[in-house]
Image (cartoon, grey):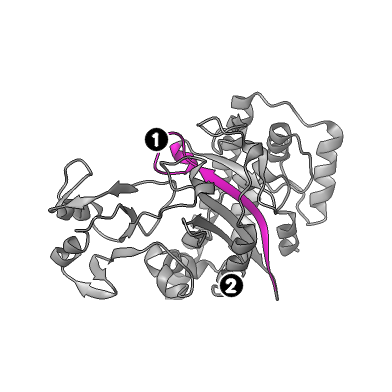
Amino acid sequence: MKLFYVLIYLSLRCYRICTQFSHKIHLKNKIKELIRTNGLGKLSKSQKAQVKVFYSKYRILNVSPLWHRYYTKSNSIFSTEYIPESLFYLRIEKKLNLQSHIAALEDKNLLSKLLTNTKQPCTILKNINGYFYVDDDLVSIEKAAEACENDKKMVVKPTIETGGGKNVILFTCSNGITSYEGFTIKKLLEKYQKDYIVQEVVEQHPSMAQLNPTSLNTLRVMTFMSENNVTVLSTIVRFGLKGSYVDNATQGGLTCGVQRDGKLNGVGYQNLTGVKYEATDFGLPLKNITLPFMEKIKHSLHQMHKSIPYFKLISWDLAIDKDENVILIEYNVSGQDLNMHQLNNGPVLGILLNELV
């Protein structure tokens, strides 16, 4: 019996090592492709040496300077404090956030329970593990379908293992027929099988709508909770292309850094390709845009993060409604998209390296 447990332990350990190695290879290939595609030059010998010396303070002796090269040659800001994606995803995130709680607490269907005092989109119905809930009451699929019979624009999206705007559908419903490919509402709900949510579309603030009126444009804000404080590390605004109804980079959406006073950086990026943009898809210069609600966002995030102490590092996706209320769309505690922060805002996450000591 003891031998059996030893074999199980060794098998799990081998699996973790192989998985980590696979992730490292993937991320290494990713950065090489980004550098090659964008034709980025090399760092100087002096810059490489500075990176090596800096990371030696954290007992990291084999750090690759490729990510430093990518950010420096893309945004013209050299710093030793850039964090390579492999270090961030395989060590920092795992150390700062309680891994055993992630699968459950990232479920979008739990947000209203976890953050009861936080404004969120109006929920029409939830499907949790195949069960339908309307106003927190367990109902049949027929009652769930009836709840969608209204004059509202709605969005349906998965609540578990989500990301990248995948399987997000906007629709309206009248007499049992939706605007999505002529599906009946029952057929649309059955398409998602289980673990999804239907919510009213947020009517966004004009300051956000000017970026692209067809997509719900959001702010991605990364916060860090120390012993007695919550710090906003970086803020990015994400917005879709003309005609798109999602702002995710995987769907072509753009990103731009937001300064503390709400002023956008003069240059934004397509996060997946590193391509630079100086204006929205409608030609509005990014340098001319200022978002007026940054202090309100900061206050809201201080309250929200303190409610979820299982995770020291959280990336929040926030919308701003027509009345300038901060609306929580979701939060992320794994795969937090480090790249968009460092590409747009430079070396703003160096404080996290102290957590490795």
Q: Is residue 167 left or right of residue 319?
A: left
Magenta span: 229-251
Disc number at residue 303? 2
Q: Secondary structure at mark 1?
A: loop
Residue that label 1 marks: 243
- The crowd level at tag 2 (other Cα within 10 Å; few <14, some 14-19, many 20+) is some
Q: Secondary structure at mark 2?
A: helix
In the rendered image, the quadrant that contains the N terminus is bottom left
The picture quadrant where one finds residue 229 is bottom right
Q: Residue at x 69, y 33 (%)?
A: 74
Q: Position of residue 228 (x, y in %)?
A: 70, 76
For marks 1 and 2 on the same chain, the one whose residue lies earlier in the sequence: 1
Q: Is residue 80 left or right of residue 133?
A: right
Disc 1/disc 2 C-alpha distance (Å): 35 Å
Q: Residue at x 50, y 31 (%)?
A: 282
* Number of numbered discs visible in the structure rendering: 2
Q: Position of residue 204 (x, y in %)?
A: 45, 52
In reply to whether residue 309 is colored magenta, the answer given is no
Task: Give the foreground label among 1 and 2.
Answer: 1
> In this orientation, does residue 82 appear?
yes
In reply to whether residue 240 is colored magenta, the answer given is yes
Q: Residue at x 17, y 52 (%)?
A: 174
Q: Between 91 and 336, which is closer to the camera in this rendering?
A: 336
> In this orientation, does residue 95 appear?
no
Q: Label 2 amino acid?
A: Gln
Q: Residue at x 46, y 73 (%)?
A: 114
Q: Between 337 and 144, which is closer to the camera in this rendering?
A: 144
Q: Label 1 amino acid?
A: Gly
